[in-house]
């Protein structure tokens, strides 16, 4: 029994990156601990982007399945990444996939022949969270600038995490964030 207690103690004292490394070795207890620690946070972040609880639940399940299968590919601190950023990247991509699947199966009625540009779920959530002049100023931003500003300001991601999430170089993220702030400052003054 000492080895079970020793393993349990190692899991409880491990950070998220350590847990991912243990999951890569097939450790179910480490996977359960990783899920226990990160799923509330991840579900909250997904709900900020999508109000459909069913999609959020599906994306969570798909994300953790992907973590179980791909834990060995986590590079971690070797590439200055965090386990939380890696997990969020997986979940964000699964959310985009879910939106694409949903759009593929939804057929508009024939009377809706004119295509109407519907705002993205992220834009709707952003509009709900930010209103008035600030919301109007945000709507004037180009989508690529709004994505960066949303990730860094509303989601609280670092430049590195935003870079990983959006698949952009860090310099591009910094430039877009600066441009977005300048445009927002001008729109609000």
Image (cartoon, rainbow, N blue to C red):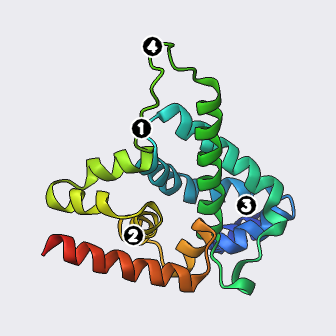
The secondary element bearing badge 2 is classed as helix
Q: Which of the image's four quarters has the C terminus? A: bottom left
Q: Nearer the viewer, mark 1 or mark 3?
A: 1
Q: Nearer the viewer, mark 3 or mark 4?
A: 4
Q: Nearer the viewer, mark 2 or mark 3?
A: 2
Q: Nearer the viewer, mark 4 or mark 1?
A: 4
Which of marks 3 and 2 precedes in the sequence?
Answer: 3
Q: Which residue is mark 2?
A: 149
Which of marks 1 and 2 precedes in the sequence?
Answer: 1
Relative to 130, is 145 above or below? below
Q: Residues within 10 Å of mark 1 (few under 14, many from 20)?
A: few
Q: Is residue 130 left or right of residue 166?
A: left
The secondary element bearing badge 1 is classed as loop
Q: Say which residue appears at 75% left-offset and 86% top-offset.
A: 78
Q: CA distance from mark 4 to mark 1?
A: 16 Å
Count of picture labels: 4
Mark number, residue 111: 4
Q: Report which quarter residue 99 is drawn in.
A: top right
Residue 1 appearing in the image: no
The secondary element bearing badge 3 is classed as helix
The secondary element bearing badge 4 is classed as loop
Q: Is residue 78 left or right of residue 100?
A: right
Mark number, residue 118: 1
Relative to 81, is 127 above or below? above
Q: Report which quarter residue 79 is drawn in.
A: bottom right
Which of marks 3 and 1 precedes in the sequence?
Answer: 3
Q: CA distance from mark 1 to mark 3?
A: 42 Å
Q: Is residue 91 left or right of residue 23?
A: left
């Amino acid at each position: 029994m000492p080895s079970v207690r020793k393993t349990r103690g190692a899991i409880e004292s491990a950070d998220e990156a350590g847990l991912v490394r243990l999951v890569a070795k097939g450790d179910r207890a480490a996977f359960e601990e990783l899920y226990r620690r990160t799923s509330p946070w991840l579900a909250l972040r997904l709900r900020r982007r999508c109000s459909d609880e069913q999609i959020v639940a599906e994306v969570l399940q798909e994300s953790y399945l992907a973590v179980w299968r791909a834990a060995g590919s986590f590079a971690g601190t070797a590439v200055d990444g965090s386990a939380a950023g890696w997990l969020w990247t997986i979940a964000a991509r699964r959310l985009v996939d879910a939106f694409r699947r949903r759009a593929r199966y939804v057929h508009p009625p024939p009377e809706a022949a004119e295509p109407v540009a519907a705002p993205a779920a992220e834009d709707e959530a952003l509009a709900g969270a930010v209103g008035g002049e600030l919301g109007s100023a945000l709507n004037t931003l180009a989508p690529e600038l709004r994505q960066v500003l949303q990730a860094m300001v509303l989601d609280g991601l670092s430049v590195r995490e935003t870079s990983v999430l959006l698949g952009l170089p860090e310099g591009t993220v910094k430039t877009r964030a600066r441009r977005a702030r300048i445009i927002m400052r001008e729109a609000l003054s």
